[in-house]
Amino acid sequence: MNIIKLNRDFLKNKLDLPYNALEENIIDTSRWSIHYEIIFEYDNKFYKTYYSQGATECQDESPWEYEEEVECTEVHKVPKIIEAWEPIE
């Protein structure tokens, strides 16, 4: 597994993350925060990382506010087959 650490300010100011992410998914919520997983491109490779943001305008939490270095895992896209139940027509 290829993991790199990137500076929070580099992610926000140079790569314009999380707003410039290729993909963004909510993975969890807590009373005060919404937790996200993002996929982004850097140096011709794709990486996954996580951040949280305040759940309301009263929660003043910005992405990676409490992290100076952010751990990012290299990823690649793979096709997956998903089974689902549908009504009979």
Image (tube, helix red, strand yellow):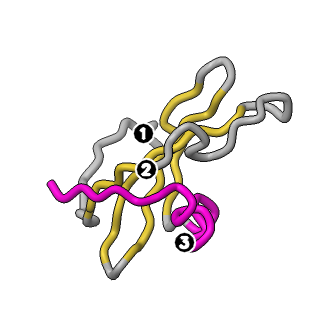
The answer to which of marks 1 and 3 sits earlier in the sequence is: 3
Q: Which of 77 and 30 is in front in this view?
A: 30
Q: Which of 78 and 22 is in front in this view?
A: 22
Q: Are marks 1 and 3 in contact (CB under 8 Å)?
A: no
Which residue position holds label 3?
15
Taking the magenta stretch, the answer to whether it contains residue 54 is no
Q: Are marks 3 and 2 in contact (CB under 8 Å)?
A: no
Quarter assignment of residue 72: bottom left
Amino acid identity at mark 3: Leu
In the picture provided, is 31 more to the left or to the right than 22?
right
Amino acid identity at mark 1: Glu
Kindly report the distance in space between the C-alpha atoms of the residues bearing marks 3 and 2. Answer: 14 Å
Which one is in front in this view, the residue at disc 2 or the one at disc 1? 2
Please tell me whether mark 2 sits on a helix, a strand or a loop: strand
Which residue position holds label 2?
69
List x then y, in percent, for residue 69. 43, 50
List x then y, in percent, for residue 26. 54, 41
Q: Residue at x 35, y 49 (%)?
A: 71
Please tell me whether mark 3 sits on a helix, a strand or a loop: loop
Amino acid identity at mark 2: Glu
In the rendering, which numbered label is found on residue 62? none
Q: Give the range drawn in magenta.
A: 1-20
In the rendering, which numbered label is found on residue 86? 1
Q: Residue at x 55, y 36 (%)?
A: 35
